[in-house]
Image (tube, helix red, strand yellow):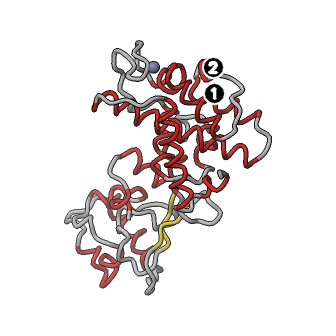
Amino acid sequence: LYKHLCKDKLTLALFKAATHVNLGDGARCSFWYDPWLEGQSLADRFPALHKHSTSRNRSVQQAVVDSNWICSIKRQPTHEVLLQFIQVWNILRNVQLNDSPDQLRWKFESSGSYSAAFAYQIQFHGRVSSPAARLIWRIGIPNKIHIFAWIVVQKRCIPHNPICQLCRTPPETAAHIFGHCSFSLQFWIALFHRYNLTINARPSSFKDGIIDWWINEDLVCISTAGKIRLGVIIMLGWWHTWLERNLRGFQNKQRSATQLCSIAAEELQAWKFAGCKGAIFFT
Ligand SMILES: [Zn+2]
């Protein structure tokens, strides 16, 4: 199951820590690597036996039928391998497969169901403050915007050019583009005005204007609907600021803050037609 999910080792480790597999027919579940045994994989629990085996890419179904897994144990096992062999033998005697498909379940969600938000929280746990995660993922908007906002608050993947493409002053950092840039500020003012939202403080008033600004505006916003409207507009604003930055940098074209505001408003309208929950708070 995991090989379909992720390639990099850290993500794989985090998925392993957060999930377990409910065995069904055993067809998609890796005998050695998926955590189908009390939330652990056989490879983690019996490393000596795993190392002494061939055919490590079998599914549970392939391994268990006719005790095929035994054929893949290499000759001349050590004492430790033999001990682990007996333990696995005993465990497998009690394994019952059925006709339903194997299911990947989340250990830490009461429903057990997979959710993208939770997957992201797991992946970045300990590396980024939770207020950002809470702000971003609670709002129903297209996933590409969630992911982009997540990148923005971590200030990742943002190239640093000598000067900002939007206001032509140095340097082009994430903190500048989304927090301190004079063009961005004009754009924010236009966008907030269009949706009748109040900017209580400028993003540039905060050391980390990107997320601290949002947290501050969120705190002074009283209603839940108001908080969602604020979040939608901030993430929509980041996205279109970034598109404008790319348009200027790569295509040598530009739009005014007012024009960009209209384009952003069209996208928000499209989200609404598409049924995004966050967009229903806008008329
Ligand atoms: Zn700028």
Could you tell me the amino acid type at mark 2?
A: Phe
Q: Are marks 2 and 1 in contact (CB under 8 Å)?
A: yes
Name the one closer to the observer, 212 or 79.
212
* Mark 1 surroundings within 10 Å by alpha-carbon count, few (fewer than 14), some (14 through 19), many (20 or more): some
Q: Residue furthest bottom?
A: 99
Give the image location of residue 132, x and y in percent.
60, 38
Q: Which mark is residue 206?
A: 2
Q: Does 146 appear above or below 180?
A: below
- Horizontal and vertical percent for residue 82? 33, 65
In the picture, residue 208 is in which quadrant?
A: top right
**Foreground residue, 55 or 208?**
208
Q: Is mark 1 on a helix, strand or loop?
A: helix
Whole-Å distance between the Cαs marked 2 and 1? 6 Å
Instruction: Check disc 2: other Cα within 10 Å, few if <14, some if 14-19, many if 20+.
Output: some
Closer to the chain start, of discs 2 and 1, is 2
Looking at the image, which residue is at 34% across and 61% down?
A: 4
Question: Which of the numbered marks, if any, corresponds to residue 212?
Answer: 1
Q: Residue 74 appears in which quarter of the rendering?
A: bottom left
Task: Give the SS element for disc 2.
Answer: loop
Q: Which residue is drawn at 35% across and 67% down?
A: 30
Q: What residue type is labelled 1?
A: Asp
The disc placed on residue 237 is none
Quarter of the picture containing the N terminus is bottom left
Which is nearer the eye, 87 or 126? 126
Q: For the view shown, which residue lies furthest in the top direction?
A: 170
In the picture provided, is 122 more to the left or to the right than 280? left
